Image: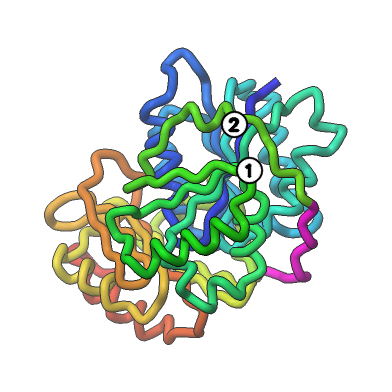
């Protein structure tokens, strides 16, 4: 049986960073796998995890939370039967509802395969001050289903967010575990805690996603002779727009960082080739992080997510102007 953990969390809470930290500090004798789902079609998280040493299966386009769960079942079966990992971490999209995933993982068909252990919810406590987040059913149910709450981004906490977390915990903490963390640095021993929370969650409201034509990791490579492409997706009250550029395309370093910082969206993430090397970009609201990257996919890719409908064409035009290599 494969020890399995669900790691949930709303947009920008730090799920992928936490998983990368867990992978970097795991027992080297163990084989781990990650099933990752992103709301958008470009696949930033899968690309970041690809060189972590884990087996990675990616479901782009928000499919994991859909009622039929078929893309998740295919990915799950592939990892369990072909990879035979010691541990499986499942990272749903921050806009996903956990009920269908937990229902599937606890279905009789998976009893011989999966040892479901603690579910973690990574939370930026400042989100408890955001009325849009608090009123979001998926946000509330991600917290409700968790056995362990990881109050991440402790370095960004404010007196108001700490007070909001204290109040929330007094009302909803119960017998669960609360962990404070900075930059997703959590102890892998948490994953071995048992699953305690079996509260019945309501089903998510019906929703749909508009997908690109191709799916999966195979779709992440550009067709021959194509320098770049754009992918759009929408659902759960949000829109996503992502771009992939070939490996020969470089961007003006300051220009791309300013473009990402000023884009009129809530979420920006990417791995970009610049004149100064590989740069990982991660922005949630006004929180803006950049770091140099040693490994990356064989291209540049960046994705924006917004609860409103930005002018993607205008953003694309300004992005294309930042290229340093030859044109289309």
Residue carrying label 2: 88
Q: Does the magenta segment cover residue 30? A: no
Q: Is residue 308 above or below residue 232?
A: below
Determine which residue is flagged by label 1. 175
- Rendered location of residue 156, percent (x, y): 30, 60
Q: How many marks?
A: 2
Marks 2/1: CA–CA distance: 25 Å
Percent of width and height locating residue 244: 40, 60
Looking at the rendering, which quadrant does residue 326 occupy?
A: bottom left
x then y, percent, for residue 283: 33, 64
Q: Nearer the viewer, mark 2 or mark 1?
A: 1
Query: Which secondary structure type mostly characterizes the magenta part of the structure?
Result: loop
* Most distant residue in the top direction: 29
Which residue occupies 62% across, 36% down?
118
Q: Please tell me whether mark 1 sits on a helix, a strand or a loop.
A: loop
The N terminus appears in which quarter of the rendering?
top right
Question: Are discs 2 and 1 less than 8 Å apart at CB?
Answer: no
Q: Local crowd at mark 2 within 10 Å, few (<14), some, or many (≥20)?
A: many
Q: Residue furthest front?
A: 170
| Magenta-highlighted residues | 200-209
- Where residue 254 sits: x, y (%)? 14, 67
Residue displayed at 70% across by 25% down: 81
Query: Circle 2 — which element?
Result: strand
Task: Say few, some or many: other residues with alpha carbon within 10 Å of mark 1 (under 14 / 14 to 19 / 20 or more).
Answer: few
Lower sequence index among marks 2 and 1:
2
The quarter of the rendered structure image containing the C terminus is: bottom left
Q: Is residue 216 visible?
A: no
Left or right side of 149 for 320: left
């Amino acid at each position: 049986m494969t020890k399995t953990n669900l790691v949930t969390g709303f947009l920008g809470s730090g799920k992928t960073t936490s998983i990368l930290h867990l992978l970097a500090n795991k027992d080297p004798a163990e084989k781990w796998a990650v099933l990752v789902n992103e709301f958008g079609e470009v696949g930033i998280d899968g690309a970041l995890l690809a060189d972590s040493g884990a087996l990675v299966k990616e479901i782009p386009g928000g499919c994991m939370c859909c009622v039929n769960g078929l893309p998740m079942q295919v990915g799950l079966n592939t990892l369990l039967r072909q990879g035979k990992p010691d541990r499986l971490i499942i990272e749903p999209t921050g806009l996903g509802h956990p009920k269908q995933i937990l229902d599937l993982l606890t279905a009789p068909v998976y009893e011989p395969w999966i040892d479901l252990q603690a579910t973690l919810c990574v939370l930026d406590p400042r989100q408890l001050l955001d009325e849009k987040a608090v009123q979001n059913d998926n946000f509330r149910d991600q917290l409700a289903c968790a056995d362990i709450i990881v109050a991440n981004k402790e370095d960004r906490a404010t007196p108001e967010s700490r007070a909001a977390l204290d109040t929330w915990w007094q009302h909803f903490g119960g017998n669960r575990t609360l962990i404070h963390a900075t930059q997703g640095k959590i102890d892998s021993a948490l994953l071995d805690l048992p699953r305690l929370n079996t509260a019945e969650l309501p089903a998510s409201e019906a929703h749909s996603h508009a997908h690109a034509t191709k799916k999966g990791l195979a779709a992440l490579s550009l067709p021959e002779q194509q320098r770049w492409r754009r992918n759009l997706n929408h659902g759960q009250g949000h829109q996503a727009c992502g771009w992939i550029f070939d490996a020969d395309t470089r961007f003006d370093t300051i220009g791309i960082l300013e473009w990402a910082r000023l884009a009129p969206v809530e979420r920006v993430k990417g791995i970009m080739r610049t004149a100064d090397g590989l740069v990982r970009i991660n922005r949630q609201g006004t929180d803006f992080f950049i770091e140099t990257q040693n490994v990356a996919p064989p291209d540049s890719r960046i994705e924006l997510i917004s609860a409103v409908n930005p002018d993607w064409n205008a953003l694309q035009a300004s992005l294309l102007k930042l290229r340093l290599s030859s044109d289309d």
